Each structure stands twice: as C-alpha cells, then as structure tokens.
Image (cartoon, rainbow, N blue to C red):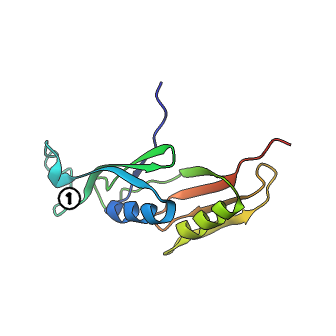
C-alpha cells in the first residue's frame, strides 16, 4: 500500500492557498493544472462557468510530505473535519509556523505550550479552514 496523501479542496481559492503555503511553510508547488489546461474537458455542468482559470489539480511538497489540492467543482466545496499535523524541530519552528499559518485571518485554537504528549504543541485553523497541529516530538523520557 502506498502512503496516504491528503487531497484538499479550496472552493475557488486554491491558487491563493498554494501561494500562502509557499510563503508560510516554504512549500514547493510541484505541479499545477488549471481546468483550461486539461486534455479532457470536464462533463457539461460539472465545473461552474468562468472556472477555466481555476486549479483542477495540484501537488504541493511540504518537507517530505506531498499534499494534493484543487479548487473542486464549486465555490462551496471545501475540506473539513481534517487537521494536518507537522512535527517540528523545536519550539522556535512551532512558533514561526504557527504565526505564519495564522496570518491573514487564521484562528488560534490552542496556542503553543507544553502538553503531556509533546514538550511544545499548538493547534490552529488557517484562513482557508484547514486545521493544523504543530508540535515537537516527545523524546520518550
């Protein structure tokens, strides 16, 4: 079985989200295809009129992980009930990424601090509605 890869939907804001994650996380866009670039046109009525310039499919590398993303097929199609978890090298990296991901309207759900499962851990929801859990791995002692 291959690794699970999250596929996120942004309801028309995918290009904005990709640019945001490039700035906030140092992510790399490995591939991006617009609906207008598809070799096969979507079935009639599947994609809203005017969405030719929207993202049909993309691939985003964050560290060793790959996340796929799209605008989906409607402005109301968005990812929900999922959080992405990042293990950071230290408290400073947690703080840096937490602040960057909260930029522009993110919600600080749990400010970083010590927990019983991590020496430093925080949770937030970014401005696109994606949940993030950032923490330092417990050393086991």
Residue reaching furthest right? Answer: 141
Residue found at the very far bottom of the displayed protein:
104
Residue count near mark 1 (Cα–Cα under 10 Å), binned few <14, some 14–19, many ≥20: few
Q: Quadrant of residue 115?
A: bottom right
92 vs 40: above or below:
below
Horizontal side of residue 16 vs 40, given as left or right: right
| Quadrant of image for the C terminus | top right
Where residue 55 appears, as percent x and y from the top left, is 27, 55
* Place of residue 87 in the rendered image (x, y in percent of width and height, measured from the top left): 63, 50
Res 102 → quadrant: bottom right
Determine whether, in the image, residue 56 is placed left or right of residue 106: left
Give 136 or 78, whichever is nearer the viewer: 136
Q: How many marks?
A: 1
Q: Is residue 130 left or right of residue 10?
A: right
What residue lies at 13% left-to-right and 48% top-to-bottom? Answer: 44
Q: Position of residue 93 (x, y in %)?
A: 64, 61
Residue 24: image location, x then y, percent: 49, 65
Which residue lies under the disc numbered 1?
48
As helix, strand or loop, the secondary structure at mark 1 comes to loop
Q: Is residue 24 above or below residue 104?
A: above
Q: Residue at x 52, y 73 (%)?
A: 103
Residue at x 48% of width, y 75% of height: 104
Classify 98 as above or below 47.
Answer: below
Residue at screen point 29% across, 57% down: 74
């Amino acid at each position: 079985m291959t690794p699970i890869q999250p596929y996120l939907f942004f309801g028309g804001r995918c290009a904005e989200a990709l640019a945001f994650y490039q700035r906030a996380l140092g992510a790399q866009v490995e591939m991006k295809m617009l609906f207008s670039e598809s070799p096969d046109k979507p079935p009639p009525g599947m994609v809203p009129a005017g969405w030719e310039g929207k993202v049909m499919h993309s691939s985003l590398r964050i560290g060793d992980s790959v996340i796929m993303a799209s605008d989906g097929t409607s402005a109301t199609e968005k990812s929900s009930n999922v959080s992405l978890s990042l293990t950071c090298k230290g408290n400073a990296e947690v703080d840096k990424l937490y602040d960057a991901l909260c930029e522009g309207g993110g919600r600080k759900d749990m400010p970083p601090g010590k927990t019983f499962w991590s020496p430093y851990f925080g949770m937030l929801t970014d401005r696109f509605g994606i949940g993030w859990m950032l923490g330092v791995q417990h050393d086991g002692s």
